[in-house]
Image (cartoon, rainbow, N blue to C red):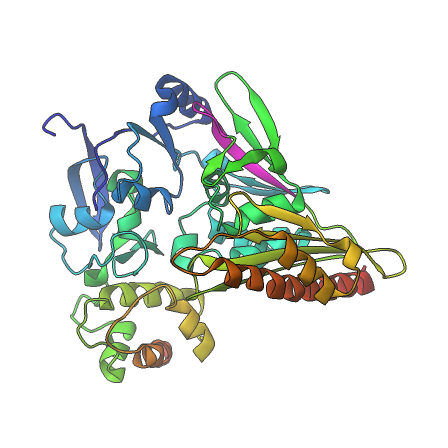
């Protein structure tokens, strides 16, 4: 497909501006992993079922395998690499996953971290049911979810601890 | 799992989109939220030659309300419609069904009009449009037309939107006084396609007696099935039996036809009870 038309796409990913030239069919997930070499975003099912590839587009959680890179031209993207503080401090959600043993193999984790990060902005103090609902669209084959639900609640707690003077 | 190559345009206005669609005819496909289209492209179940991306048509990103209608523009994401308090009050069925549309992450991108045009037999919003007797405004380069719900769904994944046309908005009648709605479904996992789902609309007369009861079904027919079960009155078990008799579902990997028929009955009763309770409450406050 040497003659396939390419498009210039500008993305601000984790605060850094990137210009890429991609065919229209380039999925955002592939653009992030292959063109930008940010392999923290994982691709599980590649058709919107598993949630592993979830990133934040202008702060909103979306599945990067269900977006064309060209269609989100000009957007600000946050991937799992962008959750950690500049000084290396884990974000509240990342810290909570460590505290609560919220991961085992880790493949699905980037999608959980991004989804929960956005979810806690909307609902900073979720109940256990709301925490379960928040992660309902993400699949994990290791943990059985119990520790991930605990991690959501713990992350909310850490957010409050860090916000306290 | 990668889409086959396609051409791409990102028009900046509705007029430009309509010209582009006219130029490409049946070779073009509209990309709105893409939450159903992208999997289809990635699995190569479809290979359109050209995508017309309407995500820059911010003029279509609206939820508007007047005395009789909630109008949802083609770029309004499910999440936005779900969060619209005025729309929720004017027509509660919208939010009741939208919270069952996939997961929050999908609702953040997917559009309500897009899911209606997609005409998936298991789509909640197709059933909502059919139950409420709404309509879809469709435009081509040369004309606009309003297509009523009962003429909009032609078959599974087939709507009345023709090549060269763009669906601009969906209109949902507001809920009348002394009326109530409900939407219930059963899915294998939260957020999955429903094995069966039922929406209900119940209206009471001035004395508080049930005057009309209608139900709409997902995942049991190629196009949204709407039943009038008013004759059963407030005997919702009898209404469930009517539904059980009238649906004619097919079996697939997720459920047998018998199980789907069983669910249609059970969910009919549940949906009618909830809608009736809503109507009673609304009458008390109205």
Q: Position of residue A39 (x, y in %)?
A: 14, 57
The quadrant holding residue B255 is bottom left
Q: Position of residue A145 (x, y in %)?
A: 32, 77
Taking the image as shown, residue B168 lies to the left or right of residue B208, namely: left
Question: Which residue shows up at 11% across the image and 52% down it?
Answer: A37
Q: How many circles with numbers are drawn on the protein?
A: 0
Taking the image as shown, residue A143 lies to the left or right of residue B17, namely: left
The quadrant holding residue A151 is bottom left
Taking the image as shown, residue A110 lies to the left or right of residue A149, namely: left
Q: Residue furthest right?
A: B207
Residue nearest the observer in this picture, A139 or B120: B120
Question: Which residue shows up at 56% across the image and 23% down it?
Answer: B144
Residue nearest the observer in this picture, B234 or B32: B234
Question: Which residue shows up at 67% across the image and 49% down it?
Answer: B227
Question: Is A29 above or below relative to B207?
Answer: above
Quarter that holds the C terminus of chain B: bottom right
Question: Is B194 above or below relative to B14?
Answer: below
As for residue B274 lying within the magenta part, the answer is no
Residue nearest the observer in this picture, B142 or B10: B142
Question: Which residue shows up at 52% across the image and 31% down it?
Answer: B160
Q: Which residues are magenta?
A: B161-172
The quadrant holding residue B230 is bottom right
Q: Position of residue B116 (x, y in %)?
A: 50, 42
Does residue A156 appear in this view? Answer: yes
As for residue B171 lying within the magenta part, the answer is yes
Does residue A162 appear in this view? Answer: no
Q: Position of residue A84 (x, y in %)?
A: 21, 67
């Amino acid at each position: 497909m040497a003659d396939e038309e390419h498009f210039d796409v500008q993305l601000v990913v984790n605060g850094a501006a990137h210009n890429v030239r991609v065919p229209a069919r380039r999925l955002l997930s592939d653009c992030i992993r292959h063109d930008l070499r940010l392999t923290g975003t994982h691709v599980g099912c590649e058709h919107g079922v598993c949630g592993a590839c979830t990133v934040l587009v202008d702060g909103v959680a979306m599945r990067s395998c269900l977006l064309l890179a060209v269609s989100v031209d000009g957007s600000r993207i946050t991937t799992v690499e962008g959750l950690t503080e500049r000084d290396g401090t884990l974000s509240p959600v990342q810290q909570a996953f460590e505290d609560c043993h919220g991961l085992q193999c880790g493949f699905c984790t980037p999608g959980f971290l991004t989804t929960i990060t956005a979810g806690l902005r909307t609902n900073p103090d979720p109940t256990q049911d709301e925490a379960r609902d928040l992660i309902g669209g993400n699949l994990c084959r290791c943990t059985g979810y119990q520790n991930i639900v605990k991690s959501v609640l713990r992350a909310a707690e850490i957010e409050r601890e860090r916000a306290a003077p | 799992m990668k889409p086959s190559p396609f051409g791409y345009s990102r028009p900046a206005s509705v007029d430009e989109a309509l010209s582009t669609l006219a130029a490409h005819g049946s070779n073009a496909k509209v990309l709105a939220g893409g939450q159903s289209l992208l999997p289809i492209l990635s699995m190569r179940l479809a290979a359109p030659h050209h995508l017309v991306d309407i995500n820059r048509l911010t003029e279509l990103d609206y939820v508007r309300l007047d005395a009789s209608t909630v109008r949802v523009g083609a770029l309004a994401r499910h999440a936005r419609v779900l969060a619209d308090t005025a729309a929720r009050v004017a027509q509660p069925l919208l939010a009741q069904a939208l919270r069952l549309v996939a997961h929050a992450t999908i609702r953040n991108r997917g559009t309500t009009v897009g899911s209606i045009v997609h005409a998936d037999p298991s789509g909640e919003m197709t059933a909502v449009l059919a139950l409420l007797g709404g309509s879809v405004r469709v435009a081509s380069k040369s004309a606009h037309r309003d297509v009523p719900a009962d003429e909009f769904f032609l078959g599974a994944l087939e709507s009345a939107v023709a090549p060269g046309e763009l669906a601009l908005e969906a209109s949902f009648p507001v809920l009348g006084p002394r009326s109530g709605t409900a939407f219930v479904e059963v899915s294998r996992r939260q957020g999955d396609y429903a094995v069966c789902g039922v929406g209900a609309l119940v209206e009471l007369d001035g004395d508080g007696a049930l005057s009309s009861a209608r139900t709409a079904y997902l995942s049991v027919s190629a196009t949204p099935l709407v039943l009038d079960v008013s004759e059963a009155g407030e005997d919702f078990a009898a209404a469930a039996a009517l539904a059980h008799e009238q649906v004619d579902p097919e079996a697939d990997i997720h459920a047998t036809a018998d199980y789907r028929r069983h669910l249609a009955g059970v969910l009919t009763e549940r949906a009618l009870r909830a809608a009736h309770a809503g109507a009673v409450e609304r009458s008390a406050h109205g």
